[in-house]
Amino acid sequence: MKLGRFQRGAALTVAGASVLGLAFGAVAPAQAASKTTITWLTDNTASAVKIANATVAAFQKANPGIKVVIHTRGSGSDADNLVKTKLATGNMENVFNYNSGALLQAINPTKTLVDLTTEKFQKNVYDSFKPAVSVGKKIFGGPWGTAMGGGLYYNLADFKAAGITSTPKTWAELITDAKKLKAGGVDAICGTFGDSWTDQLFVLADFYNVHAAVPNFVAQYTANKAKYANIPAALAGFQHLEETYKLGLYNSDAATAKFQDGVDRVVSGKCAMYPMLTFVTAGLTADQMDKVGFMAQPGTDAKNVGLTTWMPMAMYIPKSTKGAQLTAAKKFVDFIVSKKGTDAYNVGQGAYLAPFVTVDQSPAPAGVPQATADLAALVKSGKTYPALEFVSPIKGPNLLGITVQVSTGQVTAAQGAALYDQDVVAQAQQLGLKGW
Amino acid sequence: MSKKNSLMRSRLRTYPMWFAIPLAIVFLTLYVAPTMTAFYYAMQRWTLFDTTFIWFDNYKLFFQDPFLLGGVVHTFIYAFLTSGLKVILGMFFGIILMSNMRFRGLLRNIVFFPVLVSTIGVGLTFSSLMKPNVGLLDEALKVFGLPPEGLLGNVNSALYAVIAVDVWKGVGLATVIFIAGMAAIPTEYYEAAKVDGVTSWQNFRHIVFPLLRPATNTVIILSLIGGLRSFDLIWAMTGGGPGFASDVLASLVFKKYQAGFFGLSTAGNVIMFFLIIVIVLPLQRYLQKKERELS
């Protein structure tokens, strides 16, 4: 919205008046009406709401003419369907945060979202993030939240007790260490297949290693030319599941244990390692954070230990947002991607927990928890690559069930990989990809 | 004259057609129309944003699903086992609860009580009872050599654990149907049999069992249909896992819906619809025929 001189003057007066109004504890309705109000759909978890509130407070302080109203939604498949329905019916909030990567492709961005390619804030975003919110050359989002790593949390005391001084650099070393840990009387690896999504980590977090071995895997895979079953580097993730099962490295109740059990046990030391994403750190108390470290999932090359990263969610603006609200929504996204925005995010979560994917951000303060320091060091080393779902639109819905089949010995690694190759066909066809 | 007579008779016999219209409207809009649209959407690749007409590709894809065969087998095991057990146990409880015994009313209520509880609640309660290392049921069964991964964590026992809970929950309804069936048997039969000096086994075999036929058929049909489309209990207890070890047709279809394959999951529903018809209709015919032969 372009403001004429007169209007701009009026806006300034109103802004001044509203500050006065606040000072006296009363805002007249006429002043409230001239504000632009936008709505924001975000997650409903307690921690997410805290972060959202802190962000909105900081934004409104910097932009007194705009009011942001927070609406919340659940998560998981229900949220996917809610977001799709709202977009399809034109009832989406003015701005919303949602997954980047494969899930974004499923909401048909070119038809439903505002193109944000030329917005100024894009120069503040890491290039590694952009493919996760792009279709062709158009960019549809700005990052919301921090990057995550996929790897293994490990209990510092358990490692010390087993005489392990440094984290394993290859998968073979990891197995040797796991056997030592098991001999020491703890569960070497925590399996929590009761929440079956947790069992996908060995496959998904191995993608840095897959990419290192087969650099053109992504393009070949998306074009229906490369398969998990017939490329050894890709098959390795499934083999890890089979090997750890056969060696009895999991806890005895792995098939029914849940995600929270895994977190509790790796913190308490009942389990020595827990394959997981680094978002766990944000949910730990300060004492709990001191008990664990984090490592990338090692591959075959000890000289090339790198981290598979999960891109943060992104802020999107639906095409149904127009006029003054569109301008305000763009301002809001611009703020979130700035240093002020990331600082507000850290205020909301109560600590500095992970690096953002923006160039302009406050550096990590000294004395951050071990797992955060480990993650920051991995990101800083530059040896990172996004998980497959952020660089290819294909992700099969049954990977979680298939990985559980492999890690409970129902099928072999090779059979599991072949089943997964078959599973992605429906997704690829649904997206209308070429060659499927 | 005769024509007029027959007209009058038919007028007397049947209500005018428009009496049926209100019900027909409800039936058409809430039942027939959605079913017809399901056949339509089953032939679409449907993303909520647009649809592509793809003929029978969804059906083809559904039949190629590597977990379909397992799902169908599990569905049959689930349906026939729960149905059979409900008939046997329901009849057993029915006979006991018809006899003159103390606390009969209280016991009847206790047997029926699980039917009243929400299925999801029952599922969550039993999955905690069966939780390895902490669940009461799991700990108790360990005495008999239950492996450490527990009932629900074991690939071979998960489905049967859910079946046991389904029977526990559903047997009360079967019992009530059997009790009602037995109450309808005229006492003259028993009196006559007494005069002839029959044993209690003969009494059951030749009087109660044959005359309970209608009740038995009702229990078989109801529990078989319930078993074939069962979903909520399985979803609450195992989510179809571990892996796909307790997945049934309905949970496979639901997973496809969750993944956003709306056309594909609708095709799955259409297949399930026909499968239930193909099994239940002939069975019902057969059972009714037997019933008629008897009377």
Image (spheres, rainbow, N blue to C red):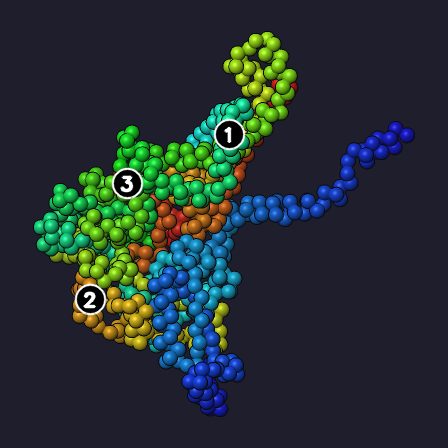
Real-space Cα separation, disc 3 to disc 2, in angstroms: 36 Å
The residue that disc 2 covers is A368
Is the residue A14 above or below the residue B71 in the image?
below
User: Which element is circle 2 on?
Assistant: loop
- Label 2 chain ID: A
Query: With A392 as the anchor, is B61 left or right in this view?
Result: right
Name the residue: 49% across, 69% down.
A320
Task: Report the chain holding disc 3.
Answer: B
- The quadrant in which the N terminus of chain B is found is top right
Disc 2 and disc 1 in contact, CB within 8 angstroms: no
Task: Give the number of the disc on residue B103.
Answer: 1
* Residue at 37% from the left image edge and 61% from the top image edge: A45
Residue B179, placed above or below residue B133: above
Q: Amino acid at mark 2?
A: Val
Residue for badge 3 = B133
Kindly give the residue lying farthest to the top in the view shown: B196
Q: Residues within 10 Å of mark 3 (few under 14, many from 20)?
A: some
Of callouts 3 and 1, the N-terminal one: 1
The amino acid on which the numbered mark 1 sits, given as a three-letter code, is: Phe
Quarter of the C terminus of chain B within the rendering: top right
